[in-house]
């Protein structure tokens, strides 16, 4: 039963993430992102990571997306107009990349999706402990943590660049 709920939540997270990217209305995009983040929180709970699930709900679905909605409604940004198909090569390459990554994902799931370890009767004592999570994050996974911070910095620079798009000559 837990596997079915996990699969449904993961499917909902992927679906609403695609809806967020494909939607031209920014308010609907942010609202679909709220649903995707909530589905991710369900996945985290089923993966026995309640601390990460609570942080997901409080920080992302709670604070950041409410800020996004407030700014979108304050600025009264309307839907983006659909431009004509002036770049058919990009559309073809993008479609090919989506299909290729989808096939790779489905093949990976087919090969390893059914080989889940059998659950043991006891859970580790520190599975949801924030101190052990922080110790592990800043020791064994420090490079991954820093890579995500660089990625977020690049996204911030890209957002500033897009926001100043109209001010450029």
Image: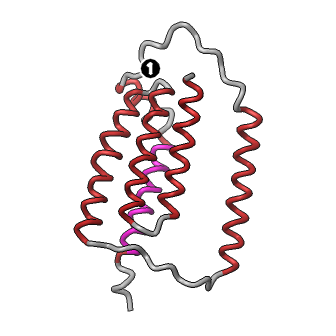
Please state, as top left, top right, bottom left or bottom right, where the C terminus lies in the image. bottom left
Q: Where is residue 99? Give x, y as percent.
A: 72, 58
Q: Is residue 79 left or right of residue 144?
A: left
Q: Image point 28% across, 53% down: which residue?
A: 66
* Element type where label 1 sits in the image: loop
Quarter-wise, where is residue 3 in the image?
top right
Q: Image point 67% across, 60% down: which residue?
A: 98
Q: Is residue 127 left or right of residue 112?
A: left
Q: Is residue 110 magenta?
A: no
Colour scheme: secondary structure
* Position above or below: 86 against 46: below
Please state, as top left, top right, bottom left or bottom right, where the N terminus lies in the image. top right
Quarter-wise, where is residue 166 in the image?
bottom left
Q: Main secondary structure of the magenta part?
A: helix
Residue under numbered circle 1: 127
Q: Where is residue 160? Give x, y as percent.
A: 36, 71
Name the one closer to the observer, 9 or 122: 9
Q: Image point 45% across, 55% down: which residue?
A: 150
* Position above or below: 144 against 47: below
Q: Is residue 150 magenta?
A: yes
Q: Is residue 97 left or right of residue 66?
A: right
Q: Where is residue 158? Give x, y as percent.
A: 43, 69
Q: Residue furthest bottom?
A: 169
Name the one closer to the observer, 72 or 166: 72
Q: Where is residue 39? Give x, y as percent.
A: 46, 40
How would you rate the neighbour count of disc 1 (Cα within 10 Å): few for under 14, some for 14-19, many for 20 or more? few
Q: Which residues are magenta?
A: 144-162
Quarter-wise, where is residue 29 in the image?
bottom left
């Amino acid at each position: 039963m837990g596997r079915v709920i996990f699969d449904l939540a993961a499917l909902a997270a992927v679906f609403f993430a695609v809806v967020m990217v494909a939607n031209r209305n920014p308010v609907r995009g942010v609202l679909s992102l709220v649903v995707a983040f909530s589905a991710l929180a369900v996945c985290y709970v089923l993966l026995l990571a309640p601390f990460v699930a609570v942080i997901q709900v409080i920080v992302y679905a709670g604070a950041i997306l409410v800020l996004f909605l407030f700014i979108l409604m304050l600025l009264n940004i309307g839907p983006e107009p659909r431009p004509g198909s002036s770049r058919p090569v990009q559309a073809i390459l993008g479609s090919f990349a989506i299909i290729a990554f989808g096939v790779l994902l489905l093949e990976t799931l087919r090969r390893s999706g059914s080989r889940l370890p059998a659950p043991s009767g006891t859970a580790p004592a520190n599975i949801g402990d924030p101190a052990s999570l922080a110790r592990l994050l800043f020791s064994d996974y420090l490079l991954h943590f820093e890579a995500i911070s660089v990625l977020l910095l690049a996204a911030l620079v890209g957002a500033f660049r897009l926001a100043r798009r109209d001010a450029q000559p």
